Image (cartoon, helix red, strand yellow):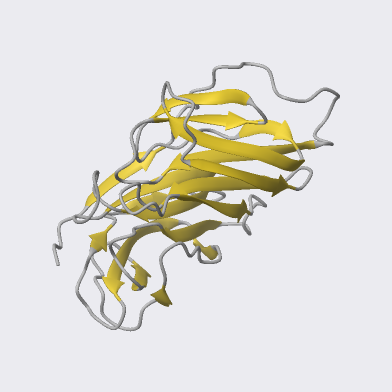
Amino acid sequence: MCRISRFSLLAMTALVVAVSTFTTGCGDSGHASLRVVHASPDAPNVDVVVDGKTVLTNIPYEQASDYLTVNDGSRHLQVRPTGTTTNVIDTNVTLASKSYETVLAVGTVSDSSLTALPLQDDNTLPASGQIKLRLVHASPSAGPVDIYVGAPGSGVSGSPTLTNVPFKAAANYLAVPAGSYEVYFTPTGTKTIALNSGPLTLAAGQIRTAVALDAPGGGFPLAAIVLKDLN
């Protein structure tokens, strides 16, 4: 197994083609926040359609949108290769009022496993002096993994923070003191590093989601992107 990894810090600006939101009214009542992540390694750039309106266009692999404000309730979500009307994902997602949700396009086109992975985001502020970090396994090539979270350079000594995490699983947010951390993914039951995040420094009050991905096109070396949930 290749042990080389890449690490990308994404705080991307959404590629929104409609400036206005999809709702009317005031305040947050009746609204929800939706973020979309292109996490399919062999899929081309994609457009995202919500309730028949194209809201994001030409999104490449490993990129995430900002949160989009949409109506709450059941939303019709479609993902299609840019410039086409052929849907590779066609599903409904249910959004609670004032909620935050991230939907990842995961799996691969080659084996027709491409699907939507909805995640409920918890953007309530962490306790004073702390940060929150969520880890998501979105690598179709990796198999179940153990995840180690420690100080930079700490490696995979000791017991893993999370064990036997399967593909398409998202861990609960870890609440830890602000500071510098490093995240390692290993095949379950081994100390073989499949992904090393590199140092990740977070200030008090920040919330992040780290997503493990295949290399572009699929397979190894694995990569990681870090999404800015809050602050």
Q: Nearer the viewer, residue 61 or 32?
A: 61
Q: Residue at x 23, y 65 (%)?
A: 194
**Residue 204, relative to residue 17: is it above or below?**
below
Write down the quadrant of residue 2 in the picture. Answer: bottom left
**Residue 106, relative to residue 173: is it above or below?**
above
Q: Nearer the viewer, residue 122 or 222?
A: 222
Left or right of residue 120, residue 82 in this image? left
Write down the quadrant of residue 53 in the picture. Answer: top right
Left or right of residue 215, residue 124 in this image? right
Please state, as top left, top right, bottom left or bottom right, where the C terminus lies in the image: top right
User: Residue 157: percent from the left, percent from the top?
Assistant: 26, 80
Q: Nearer the viewer, residue 206 or 128?
A: 206
User: Residue 57: percent from the left, percent from the top?
Assistant: 47, 24
Q: Residue at x 41, y 65 (%)?
A: 167
Q: Residue at x 40, y 47 (%)?
A: 226
User: Residue 179: percent from the left, percent from the top?
Assistant: 41, 56
Please state, as top left, top right, bottom left or bottom right, where the N terminus lies in the image: bottom left
User: Residue 187: percent from the left, percent from the top?
Assistant: 27, 74
Q: Nearer the viewer, residue 87 or 18?
A: 87
Q: Residue at x 62, y 47 (%)?
A: 101
